[in-house]
Amino acid sequence: MTSVRGYFHPKTATGASSLIPAPPWRYSGDLLTVEYRTDPARVRELLPEPLQLADEDPGAVALIWADWQSCGTSGDELLDPVRAQYKEAFAVVRCQYQGRTYTRCVHIWVDKDFAIARGLHQGYPKKLGSIHQTRPHPYGPAPRIEAGARFGATLAAADRRLAQAVVTLREPSATNGFVNAHPMAHHRWLPAIEKGKGLALDELIESGTASFEGGQAWVGDAELELFDAPTEELARLEIREPIAAYYRQVGVVWDGGRLLESGTSGAE
């Protein structure tokens, strides 16, 4: 009897071709976070039932650039950097489910296929994009992590620039912002293969970090611009009021989530 192996597609006789290994997944990254307020109605239109707007600051948005190295349990990917290194940019909002506040990723772009595969599993709406951000370095012209340091970040997809930011650090901070500071509430969706049968998979899930460590966070100010594009809707989360910007180096482990409910989102 023939069997095929692998945590994710493609499954083969050995499993070596699988896009991603089984969790836990480990990450080391540099994060640039820009928080601002938009029209709460633009947040609400991105929240399927049963999710609701957060009671406090319902229009708050965080746009985050991340420069990652990631690996499975063995850590082998770190010695084959093409399998470990990737960049992403994502927009998160806050929402509420059964009286509890969650964070939800509503737009996200990555530059590697294995990151898209992980997103499908976790409920992140990942798409391919071109993401760049300034890296700190203790020597030469790159910025140090200190007051006055300036970092640039850009996001493009399908040959169109979607966002750009310049962050200037001001001082150490006790937090890395508040919008992305909750467990994630995501939907895992998969259309049925038969026409008219709706969704074969329709789950609202909660997930978060199994463990976390981080360096000193820094707060500063940001110049942020969003741009219209024919196949992207990030600019609908228009900037009405800047909040703050942050820089932090982090290490996290992701090791699964839990089902909140299924078959109730009404997604089409």
Image (spheres, rainbow, N blue to C red):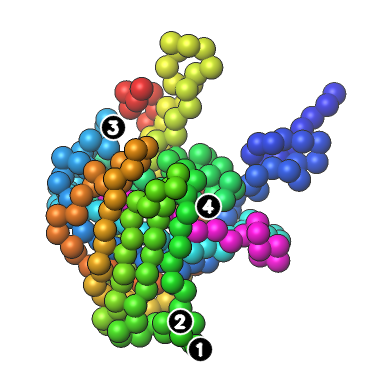
Q: Identify the residue under disc 1.
A: 139
- Judge left or right: residue 36 versus residue 158: left
Q: Earlier in the sequence, mark 1 or mark 4?
A: 4
Q: Amino acid at mark 2?
A: Ala
Q: Kindly report the distance in space between the C-alpha atoms of the residues bearing marks 2 and 4.
A: 23 Å
Q: Secondary structure at mark 2?
A: loop
Secondary structure under tag 1 reads loop
Mark 4 or mark 3, which is nearer to you? 4
Q: Residue at x 53, y 17 (%)?
A: 193
Left or right: 29, with 63 as reference point: right
- Proximity of marks 2 and 1: CB atoms separated by less than 8 Å: yes
Q: Nearer the viewer, residue 15 or 159?
A: 159
Which mark sits nearer the N-terminus, 4 or 3? Answer: 3
The amino acid sitting under disc 4 is Asp
**Label 4 CA crowd tier, 10 Å (few <14, some 14–19, many 20+):** many
Circles 2 and 3 in contact, beta carbons < 8 Å: no
Q: Looking at the picture, how far across and down is residue 150, in whole percent?
A: 34, 78
Question: How many numbered markers are drawn?
Answer: 4
Question: Which span is picked out in magenta?
Answer: 78-93
Q: Does residue 185 appear in this view?
A: no
Asked if marks 2 and 4 touch (Cβ < 8 Å), the reply is no
Q: Which residue is mark 2?
A: 142
Q: Is residue 215 above or below residue 80?
A: below
Residue 48 is labelled as 3
Q: Residue 2's quadrant in the figure? A: top right
Q: Residues within 10 Å of mark 3 (few under 14, many from 20)?
A: some
Residue in the picture at 38% in, 40% down: 186
Kind of residue indicated by mark 1? Tyr
Residue at horizontal 20 percent and vertical 49 percent from the top: 238
